[in-house]
Amino acid sequence: MAFKNMYAALVIAGFVGALLTGCGEQQSTGDPGVTDTEIKIGNTNPYSGPASAYGTIGRAHTAYFDMINEQGGVNGRKINFISLDDGYSPPRTVEQIRKLVEEEQVLFLAGTLGTPTNTAIHKYVNAQQVPHIFVNTGASKWDNPQNFPWTMGFNLSYPNEAKIYAMYLLENKPDAKIAILYQNDDYGKDYVHGLKDGLGDKAESMIVAETSYEVTDPTVDSQIVSLQASGADTFFNVTTPKFAAQAIRKVYDIGWRPLHILNNVSSSVGSVLKPAGLEKSVDIITAVYWKDPTDPQWADSPDMKEYKAWFEKYYSEGNIEDGFNVPGYVIAWGVAELLKECGDDLTRANVMKQMALIKDVEAPLMLPGIKWNTSADDFALIESGQLARFDGEQWVLFGDIIGN
Amino acid sequence: MDGMHVNKTRLIVIGIAVLVAFLLPFVVGSYRVFQFNLVLVYAIVLLGLNMLTGYNGQISLGHGAFYAIGAYVAAIMMDKLGVPYWATVPAAGLVCFVAGFLFGFPALRLHGHYLALATFALGISMPQILKYKGLEHWTGGVQGIVILKPQAPFGLNVSQDQWLYLFSLFVALFMFWLAWNILRGRIGRAMVAIRDHPIAAEAMGINVAAVKTLTFGVSALYAGVGGALGAIVVQFVAPDSFVALVSISFLIGIVIGGLASISGVIYGAIFIQFVPNIADEISKAAPWAVYGLFLLAFVFLAPKGVAGLVQLLWGKAEASWKRTRAQKTTLQS
């Protein structure tokens, strides 16, 4: 009898215990930043300081969420997008992010801009387990789900862009003799590694020369001369705008006519190709993955029309010619879609779970055929692009979408 | 008697301020603790700069460079050599003292605007020097160095932020005590004499060259100690953290706080820590324009710095208090 009682007691205890844990699980869904009417999202952008040209991206995010909120928000909740100025200064980024996480209690961080600034908060956000998504820089370190499971980048990363060039070369110019000029830092090395990865076994035979420059160097003229002397017929130009313009001019002036591959970082017509000389830039190749709002061929595409309508109504103080507004719009679109996917399960864990479940998503303003894909062990959102050739006036797309 | 009385109230005010500073981390959230920790860091740097510029009359637009050196010394020692965080602070100060002392020699030949330009050159070149290839093994290049936040020792039941704040407060109090001793003594008077009239100072037997170079060294030492603490608090150093604007904001700090004033550096530190954030909250489109308005307002309303304004108000309050007391005594008699 006593035995029977104890058995019953155990069963009841187990049942009650299960109920309690069940309740516990339900309570844990109450992550910060979410109420029945609002979702708080944090962001930092350089509205002041040396990189304030990027500030328009943050303003575009805000303008996009203004539109979403006017349409009633996501699943009945308004988006409270709190974007703070970090002046592109890492210590201020740390400060502002701590404010967002600890004081504002945002659900997650999205679109934080800059490589040094995001590096400064990388460990912190992962220790706090706050989703740090659509990180707006091209560095490859945001794709590291093993060590940093709360961070995921947005852009086509530098190594993945370099792999696109490698695939193009292997297919179209397998006997290319490649000379590389790169900036001697993380960004430059990311590209060089990516190219070598992409070329695989053939890297050693195809790359005939590689040389670097320092950001402090006055010019890259001597590097160009020595690269030409290597007998290369393909030039991989991994430089930031000022040096890119110098390199393009020098290559042309010394009569070198290689297949010239220019990294996307310096593909701006206005700030690189024009100063270098448009006639000297003809036939340069680069990889792109989103639509240029000034390119007439997209004028009639529905997503571009929508973009322009949004721009006029919600961001009329911005400059429509400024290409930086495109990622501003696209990232905000991505955040809104993510929230729709999360539904009412608005927890930090679910945000990361949904981020890792993106499958063949065709985002607006992406080039046709470019799809977003992620998985639990692949945190690179965009891994493909299309090549474009400069015709003396603008970039002209050619070939297929390359990459995964 | 009266002088004694003023000193006594001043001591009480300082005592209350220190007590409040000690209790602060236990009443505000950890993010605010972090912000006030940065205020302490800036106060130390500004104190050093104020010795140089406020007391000795040598303008520096390049103290961000010494701040950066201090930060990197601390980061490299912690990250590459495994030195404990507390030991990096005096080391950073020492390295910066030597650097500042050496820079003080060429500075001897330069006066006023020319010195400002020479120091500015130091400030603007520092981020690029930190990216230099030959040093990359140590500095981590553009990527910078990420350092770990120290835990509170002796099993103290305080958070990492609270502990770091208290540690910084101890360092700051020590640095203030040191500065107070230097400035009120013979050396302090020599510094002021050189600022006001270098020829007369020399005629009085002051070794102008020695005092000026030493002041430069000590000032850099303060910037180095602040830099080391700043690096530990922020847990990250990178060239982008030490752009030329940092140097300029330090100069803004001492002018806003009050030149040649020890207490002024605290107001200055509060200004450079909080006003940019307030500006950002007021306008995303032009935060620097708002910052500029604040700057103009302070310069017009408190032309002798916040410390000067506080002293003025304090003096008025005291005078009126004395008047009422005098009236009372006459009435009673």
Image (tube, coloured by chain):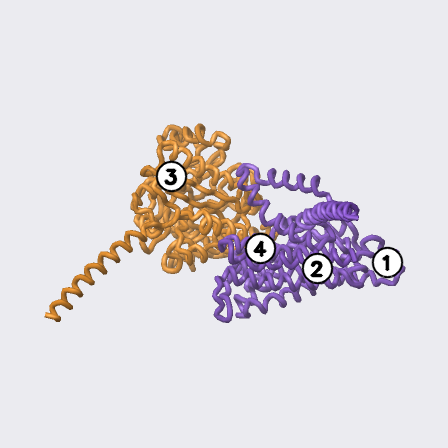
1 or 2: tag closer to the N-terminus = 1
- List the residue tagged with mark 3: A333
What residue is shown at x 34% (from left), y 49% (from top)?
A30
Q: CA distance from mark 4 to mark 2?
A: 19 Å
Q: Is A156 situated above or below A291? A: below
Viewer-side residue, B320 vs A126? B320
Closer mark to the observer between disc 3 and disc 1: 1
Determine whether, in the image, residue A212 is placed left or right of residue A401.
Answer: right
Residue drawn at x 66%, y 66% as measured from the top left: B94
The answer to whether the residues at label 4 and label 3 have Cβ atoms under 8 Å apart is: no
- Name, please, the residue furthest toward the right: B203
Image vertical order of residue B165 relative to residue A228, above or below:
below
Task: Identify which amino acid the numbered label 3 is placed on.
Answer: Trp
Toward the viewer: A122 or B329?
A: B329
Q: Amino acid at mark 1?
A: Ala
Any idea which chain is the purple one in this picture? Answer: B
Comparing B316 with A349, the one in front is B316
The residue carrying mark 2 is B219
Do pointers 2 and 3 mark residues of a single chain? Answer: no
Q: Residues within 10 Å of mark 3 (few under 14, many from 20)?
A: some
How far apart are the two marked residues, 2 and 3, measured between alpha carbons?
51 Å
Q: Give the chain letter for orange.
A: A
Residue A396: image quadrant is: top left
What is the spatial separation of the Cα atoms under label 3 and label 1, in whole angstroms?
68 Å
